[in-house]
Image (spheres, grey):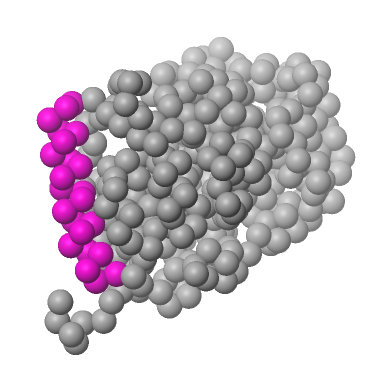
Amino acid sequence: MDSKIEKRDILIVNYQELSKLPPVLNLIEILVKNHFSVSVITIDSNSISEKFRDDNILFYYLSKKKENHPVDFILRKRKIRALVKEQMEHHRVIWTTTDITVREIGKLLFQYAHIMQLMELVEDLPYFPGQKLFMCNLEKYAKKAKAVVVPEYNRAHILQSWWNLDKTPYILPNKNSVLNNSGQGMDPKYKEHYKRLKNEKRKIILYQGILTKERPLEPYAKAIEMMKERYCFCIMGDDINGEAVRLKEKYECVITIPFIYPPQHLFFTNLAYIGILSYHPVKIKHYSILNALYCAPNKIYEYCGYGIPVIGNDIPGIRFPVELYGMGHICKEMTIEDIRTGIECIEENYDVKRGNCLRFYEQADLNTIICDEILKF
């Protein structure tokens, strides 16, 4: 390396679609804001990197993954490792954002100052996708990392117990930076959807996120249908399995908005009156069954950043913050009556709960967590 070239601070490696991971986008923003020089290796088919074109960030792009193809798997790992090795000649720290990213880079990580961030709760994952005989052994990477980072308190202690870590992982909440409220700067392809929602006369109860069996929405649709003169139920997300369409056809209260790429989706969030948090423990991929139980939704910060009270089911990851800060209602039974009671309770105390939401949002200081805690080694 040319002696005149100074090392950049941090290489972020994100083996996932960057535009679908708001926490990683937010991490990049915070590092740049705090004057770190950053490079990013990622998948990005939606040109989200254009958002950072004025921030002196270097981007390196990987092709979209084909998880179960053996040849692609081997070639991909070689490419990622070669790129990491090349880039780490010019960087001080490598920050991996997911468990799969750790697997792709492998033992090469042991050569560097490594920050290991985990978006989901996972004890281990197969070394090769689709098989269970050979495992990656995430524990050994966590033990050698300079810091392990998770988004939720209970997950931190669960991982410390599973892996016998000397230090409890750092907790970096999935908090987003709230955009302006005007809709200015919105991608033109979203404006028709935005206009439709903005012109809605009823109060909007919003669910935004993935649509899977882990996130059941029909109980909410049933309850809101009985209040459809005052409220509508907006479901916003990628309807791969047709669940949103099914609910729209069945219930008059339901309206749908397609998946909106972050951070543009926050323009729509700001139009909501109440936000829905729906998480039920289901075994998905290699994630722990506890993953949803101790969920760490970025949407709770997205709702609360705009002062939108929330309603959700009774699991620790939702109940503890919602009840601690008094910013919504927890449905213990998920019956129609329980959900209706929750909506009415929020309505009766809206201004107080709105203020509590904003207080909850402000208490998470990501700048301090990242710069003064995680990176202090």
The answer to which of 289 and 208 lies nearer the viewer is: 289
In x, y percent, where is residue 38? 34, 68
In x, y percent, where is residue 256? 50, 29
Residue 76 located within the stretch drawn in magenta: yes
The answer to which of 366 and 307 lies nearer the viewer is: 366
- Please give left or right for residue 33 compared with residue 162 in the image: left
Look at the picture and state if 199 lies above or below 40. Answer: above
- Please give left or right for residue 332 compared with residue 10 in the image: right
- Please give left or right for residue 248 compared with residue 232 in the image: left
Look at the picture and state if 288 lies above or below 137. Answer: above
In x, y percent, where is residue 163? 53, 40
Look at the picture and state if 122 lies above or below 270. Answer: above
Residue 280 visible in the shown view? yes
Residue 203 visible in the shown view? no
Q: Tell me what residue is drawn at x 57 percent, y 67 percent.
A: 373
Q: Tell me what residue is drawn at x 38 percent, y 52 percent.
A: 96
In x, y percent, where is residue 140? 42, 44
Residue 240 located within the stretch drawn in magenta: no
- Please give left or right for residue 213 compared with residue 13 in the image: right
Dominant secondary structure (helix, strand or loop) of the stretch shown in magenta:
helix
Residue pushed farthest bottom? 4
The answer to which of 5 and 251 lies nearer the viewer is: 5
Q: Which residues are magenta?
A: 69-91
Q: Tell me what residue is drawn at x 59 percent, y 23 percent.
A: 281
Dividing the picture into quadrants, the one containing residue 139 is: top left
Q: Quadrant of the N terminus?
A: bottom left
Q: Tell me what residue is drawn at x 40 percent, y 74 percent.
A: 36
